[in-house]
């Protein structure tokens, strides 16, 4: 009752800071067991907040995962599939989808985003964050490797940030709202620009006595990594560790600002990531810890993520083994803010009971879709309680290089009938499929899972694929749109 009173009767609505790392594995943070990651601020969030052990994104790749985080709906509903959006993509997150920012705007929230959007640019910037409920935006509108050079080395003192590969791509732009501020972006200064922008946003919102929502989907730790002078060469893990340290430094700046402005006890800070590690990059791709495979696959390593909820005085420190997902962030924020939910089919559930009272999760199942979902195959796997059933498995190029033969793209699409069934509490590595023969209890579990699968698929209406609309080179962001020859002239 005390917490209900705080949320619904206090003079000031809560603020929200949503942090979303990129290609970060379950085993990459110090607080999740990595022996040499330097992440003091994330470790502090984990020690003083609620750390999840069974938290999932909805896709093993970037764009669809971001769509479902912001809308509380599986990417198949919004049409952000198959794969990811590109600089010249014709499609994007449909404007009739309601984002977290749009849920909060009617209540007078200030909204801002820094970092990686990756949900479309479109003609005249029609899909940019400013068209999806964000008052302010500073960032790269897609993945920072989608321009010359994919293999950039951007660490002082060796600052070769662009090369001669992908010469058909525009240089990576830094956008402020709908305008290109820099092309190519200055990677060495990028994180400090983000940090300053976010600090200014928090400060000005508090001074205006306006509740705020800050969304920070980082480029870190997606390959190729980069880091400015504050982090380069300062970690124990080489370029990956430096990039992770730079992200952690920004989080530290945001926490310090919340404290200085006196709002840290009225702010929910939530941290998670979009998909698992890109194992094909070996030690520069991230680490899935004990989990199987990584990015691009529907094994645990592709979609189970670190997640931390931090709210001093409201969320007690601890660890939860309850099932939760990025889908649940929108309904939770709406509940805490007293906002109306969008009038559409939501796949997320409200986590307030779990966060504030350490109750049970309302989430009963987790659905695993591949990078290229289709109505023909439907979902690839389903988790219910501690059990996960794989109906199809498929490796991915992103998860090449490990000794596990199930992970790379050479592990072709395989149907499993009966499905592979794993007990994820006893076997989070998905090494030992359970034997159903002679075990009526397990057979009953599988029947329940099959029933949940049929019910879910009956409720799923696939939206028109935005990515299948293709690309148009003229749609790629160019600070000098009429210049010639494109794309090399897009520089300012």
Image: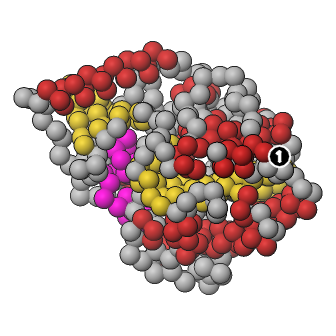
What is the x, y in percent for residue 281? 41, 61
Of all residues, the one furthest to the top in this rendering is 458
Can the viewer see residue 296?
no
Residue found farthest to the left: 438
- Magenta stretch contains residue 290: yes
> Where 46 falls versus 409 (above or below)?
below
Q: Nearer the viewer, residue 204 or 300?
A: 204
Horizontal and vertical percent for residue 38? 50, 77
Q: Secondary structure at mark 1?
A: loop
* Above or below 377: residue 361: below
| Picture mark count | 1
Q: Quadrant of the C terminus?
A: bottom right
Residue at the location (64% across, 45% down)? Answer: 1
Span colored in magenta: 282-302
Residue 240 counted in the magenta span = no
* Residue at position x 37%, y 23% in the image: 453
């Amino acid at each position: 009752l005390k917490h209900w009173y705080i949320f619904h009767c206090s003079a000031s609505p809560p603020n929200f800071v949503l942090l979303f790392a990129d290609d970060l594995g379950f085993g990459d943070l110090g607080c999740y067991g990595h022996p040499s990651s330097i992440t003091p601020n994330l470790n502090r969030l984990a020690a003083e907040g609620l750390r999840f052990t069974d938290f999932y994104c909805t896709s093993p790749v970037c764009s669809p995962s971001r769509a479902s985080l912001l809308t509380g709906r599986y990417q198949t509903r919004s049409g952000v599939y198959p794969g990811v959006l590109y600089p010249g993509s014709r499609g994007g997150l449909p404007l009739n989808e309601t984002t977290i920012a749009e849920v909060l705007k009617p209540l007078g929230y200030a909204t801002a985003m820094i970092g990686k959007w990756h949900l479309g640019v479109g003609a005249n910037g029609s899909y940019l964050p400013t068209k999806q409920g964000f008052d302010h935006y500073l960032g790269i509108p897609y993945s920072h490797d989608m321009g010359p050079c994919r293999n950039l080395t951007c660490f002082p003192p060796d600052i070769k940030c662009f090369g001669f590969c992908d010469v058909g791509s525009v240089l990576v732009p830094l956008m402020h709202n709908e305008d290109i501020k820099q092309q190519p972006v200055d990677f060495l200064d990028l994180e400090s620009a983000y940090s300053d922008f976010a600090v200014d946003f928090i400060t000005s919102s508090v001074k205006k006595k306006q509740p705020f929502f800050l969304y920070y989907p980082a480029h870190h730790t997606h390959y190729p990594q980069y880091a400015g002078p504050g982090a380069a060469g300062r970690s124990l893990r080489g370029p990956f560790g430096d990039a992770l340290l730079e992200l952690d430094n920004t989080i530290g700046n945001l926490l310090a600002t919340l404290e200085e402005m006196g709002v840290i006890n009225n702010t929910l800070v939530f941290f998670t990531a979009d998909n698992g590690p890109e194992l094909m990059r070996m030690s520069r791709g991230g680490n899935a810890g004990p989990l199987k495979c990584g990015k691009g696959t529907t094994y645990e390593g592709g979609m189970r993520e670190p997640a931390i909820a931090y709210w001093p005085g409201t969320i007690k420190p601890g660890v939860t083994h309850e099932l939760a997902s990025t889908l649940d962030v929108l309904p939770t924020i709406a509940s805490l803010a007293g906002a109306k939910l969008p009038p559409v089919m939501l796949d997320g559930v409200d986590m307030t009971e779990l966060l504030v009272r350490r109750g049970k999760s309302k989430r009963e199942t987790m659905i695993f879709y591949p990078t290229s979902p289709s109505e023909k195959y439907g979902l690839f796997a389903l988790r219910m309680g501690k059990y996960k059933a794989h109906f199809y498995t498929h490796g991915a190029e992103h998860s090449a290089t490990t000794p596990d033969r199930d992970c790379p793209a050479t592990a072709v699409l395989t149907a499993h009938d009966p499905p592979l069934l794993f007990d994820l509490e006893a076997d989070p590595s998905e090494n030992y499929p359970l034997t159903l023969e002679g075990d009526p209890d397990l057979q009953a579990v599988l029947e329940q899972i099959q029933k949940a699968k049929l019910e879910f698929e009956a409720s799923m209406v696939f939206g028109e694929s935005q990515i299948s609309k293709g690309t148009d080179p003229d749609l790629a962001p160019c600070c000098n749109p009429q210049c010639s020859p494109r794309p090399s002239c897009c520089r300012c």
